[in-house]
Image (cartoon, grey):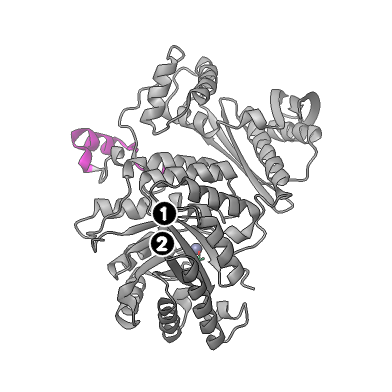
Amino acid sequence: MDNNRVVIFDTTLRDGEQSPGATMTHDEKLEIAAMLDDMGVDIIEAGFPIASEGDFRAVSEIAKNAKNSRICGLARANFADIDRCAEAIKHAELNRIHTFIGTSPLHRAIPNLTKDEMADKIHETVSHARNLCDNVQWSPMDATRTEWDYLCRVIEIAIKAGATTINIPDTVGYTAPAESADLIKRLIETVPGADDVIFATHCHNDLGMATANSLAAVAGGARQIECTINGLGERAGNTALEEVVMAMKTRNDIMPWHTGIDTTKIMAVSRRVSTVSGFLVQPNKAIVGKNAFAHESGIHQDGMLKNRENFEIMRPEDIGLSGTSLPLGKHSGRAALRDKLQHLGYEIGDNQLKDLFVRFKDLADRKKEVFDDDIIALMRTDQDAENDRLKLITLRVTCGTGGPADATLVMEVDGEEKTAIEHGDGPVDAAFKAIRKLHPNTARLELYQVHAVTEGTDAQATVSVRLSEDGIVSTGESADTDTVVASAKAYVHALNRQLVRRGKLGEGADAKEINYKDLA
Ligand code: KIV
Ligand code: ZN
């Protein structure tokens, strides 16, 4: 491979999905994997097969469906994990086992191993992985806080045992750009056999430096970046794929590296990941934030009209944003809607279009103009209504100053229509109480967020909620011109997803039974 080619290793479905609340369903994982494969991601880390039956099934199905990408599974440093991982990825034409162990003093203390015992374990487990798969990645977790001599020693052992990629994780987002570049450079210069493997960088964003640290690592000689869509991941997240890819493309004069990513697919994948994970993208997020290409101030608008390069260093089309934004209205037909969806990067089947068109018409009746963001909101909340056990039928709320709000709710529960009347501290509280009356549950409302999709008093509101019950976390989202209705629908959506996850838990489908940090 040419020396300036940087391999993109996407871990949205593993490190990203590990983020509390970001759990995706089986079908959602397959859908995201297909999008990543299609956009040119070189390696997809599809999950952690031993963690649960659900993770195993997802990794093996993604392995079967992969067209271009190499499919990788994660395994801790033990034979059971590695065997399970090898089994899950075996159907992929191109596959990889990624095995890891925490090597810093703090992480060595967890399994209580001496340096020598850990070195032996690394040799044994990497050799075992290499006997099962000819493409093995090894990671010394918390590498950036591991003693230099020991880090060199264990990397040499892993290379001798057959690792083909050595990943250097900055597990806690501790490093800084100059240090990141220097670390990789010195490792490549020092460790015997380093020239025979690819060095990878895996950064977390705790200090907001993940993108800078990853690019600096490439300057130091790394040729694989590990990243996630929208920077999804635990705590402050991982390196964002869209940021490193667009940085290399835009500043190729000083970062002369390239990837195989079709950048015009970025927006569509970003939106889908945001929807299925329930993690909204902050408006000012680099590359994919709603405002990343918006120019509101008068001076900026004037400058943009004279020459877009005055204020834009990237073209919106390069990430799949359509330049035009002609609104649709109630007279727009199905073909116009399909055309708009294609412009926005969505490919949908006839049945989905049929359902969406009904909801579009309903919205167009209530709203003068339906903008791109309204359509995106409809797509984001295109919920699996058919299988839902709870379906909101009608909601009426009365509220005003100086008294409680009253909600009258009709909801279908397992096919049976039921009514509840409840009072609350405001309309949302009353509506949620009515829902809880018809579907009693103890789920804790961890997040409740309202966003206006477009401007005006007839704007749609998007509401996101996150629920947690017995360690099962689910998110729900909905959009409506009525904020209370959007709130109730989002709550019901999250409850339906709780029910799905709980139902699957019996088979272990979506349970996080093992955390990757439990290094027993
Ligand atoms: O952050 C980390 O150290 C990881 C490892 C499993 C590579 O995600
Ligand atoms: Zn990580």
What is the quadrant of residue 297 in the picture? top left
Q: Which residue is mark 2?
A: 210
Asked if residue 442 lies left or right of residue 150, the reply is: right
Tell me what residue is drawn at x 52 percent, y 15 percent.
Answer: 365
Mark 1 lies within 8 Å of ligand 2 (Cβ measured): no
Chain part drawn in magenta: 288-310
Instruction: Inspect the magenta stretch and tell me whether residue 306 lies in it.
Output: yes
- Residue 277 coordinates in the image, percent (x, y): 55, 45
The amino acid at mark 2 is Ala
Tell me what residue is drawn at x 62 percent, y 59 percent.
Answer: 51
Q: Nearer the viewer, residue 509 or 189?
A: 509
Residue 280 makes an appearance in the image: no
2 and 1 marks in contact (CB < 8 Å) = yes
Residue 86 badge:
none
Residue 240 badge:
1
> How far apart, in angstroms, are the residues tagged by discs 2 and 1?
8 Å
Tell me what residue is drawn at x 77 percent, y 36 percent.
Answer: 436
- Among the two numbered marks 2 and 1 on one chain, the one whose residue lies closer to the N terminus: 2
Instruction: Inspect the magenta stretch and tell me whether residue 392 lies in it.
Output: no
Q: Residues within 10 Å of mark 1 (few under 14, many from 20)?
A: many
Q: Residues within 10 Å of mark 2 (few under 14, many from 20)?
A: many
Above-or-below relation of 386 to 253: above
The amino acid at mark 1 is Ala
